[in-house]
Amino acid sequence: MECMATNMGETPVLQTGRLNLVMLSRDDLALGMLSLSDLSQQLGLPLVPDLFKGAVRGAIEKKLVKMEAIGTQETPWFTYWLIVVRDEGVGAGMVGFKGVPNSLGEVEIGYGIDPLFQNMGYMTEAVKAMVAWAFKNPACKVVTAILSKPDNFASHRVLEKSGFIKFYGGPDGLSFRIERQPAQD
């Protein structure tokens, strides 16, 4: 799978075989918290109705606070990227990191997709694209997924299909990681 960065106007987009991953700005996230309809209109595409509901809402609130204190060059590491299923022309989910890589070169990924778009390989495709994007930055050496719920088998499968290895398993959850491979000469 090849990821290609393009621009829709000035908005960074990663393209995969079936998806566009559109970087949402801080203003996009704030607008979506107020009105998903207004965000849909601004982006020019329909969004699944539950995109900003439940645990995602709390995660976005945290992201908005963190994004106030960062420079715009760090935005891609803190924001969510909207998962747009091109054939359907709909924003179906989100994927993103929880900040810039730490001093060990590690960054944590998080993601979710509407149930109507599950079990179709879209999330695996999105996670692979984000990992490839992250590993283009020399500061990023490892991508992690920390304490996925023990019964979240679909998420575990996405990580495994994306090349992640489980490194912790306990009653509080499972943790996975993937390391950047050295360049082949």
Image (cartoon, grey):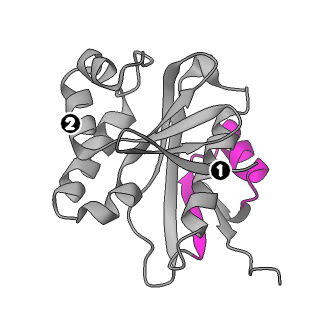
Tag 2 residue: 30
Can you give x and y, in whole percent of width and height, for residue 47 in the image? Answer: 42, 19
How packed is label 1: few (under 14 Cα within 10 Å), some, or many (20 or more)?
many
Say which of 174 and 119 sits in front: 119
Tag 1 residue: 3
User: In percent of the image, x 50 and y 62: which residue is there?
Assistant: 108
Quarter occupied by the C terminus:
bottom right
Compute the Cα span from label 1 to label 2.
28 Å
As drawn, 64 above or below 132:
above
Count of marks overlaid on the render: 2
> What segment carries the magenta color?
141-164
First-in-chain label (1 vs 2): 1
Q: Which disc is residue 126 wearing?
A: none
- Where is residue 132, by image quadrant? bottom right
Q: Is residue 74 visible?
A: yes
User: In percent of the image, x 40 and y 25: which residue is there?
Assistant: 51
Can you give x and y, in whole percent of width and height, for residue 29 in the image? Answer: 27, 37
**Residue 162 painted magenta:** yes
Can you give x and y, in whole percent of width and height, for residue 135 in the image? Answer: 60, 68
As drawn, 23 above or below 172:
above
User: In percent of the image, x 52 and y 36: which residue is there?
Assistant: 112
Does residue 104 appear to the left or right of 44 in the view shown? right
Q: Nearer the viewer, mark 1 or mark 2?
A: 1
**Residue 9 painted magenta:** no
Say which of 162 and 38 sits in front: 38
The kind of residue on which mark 2 rests is Ala
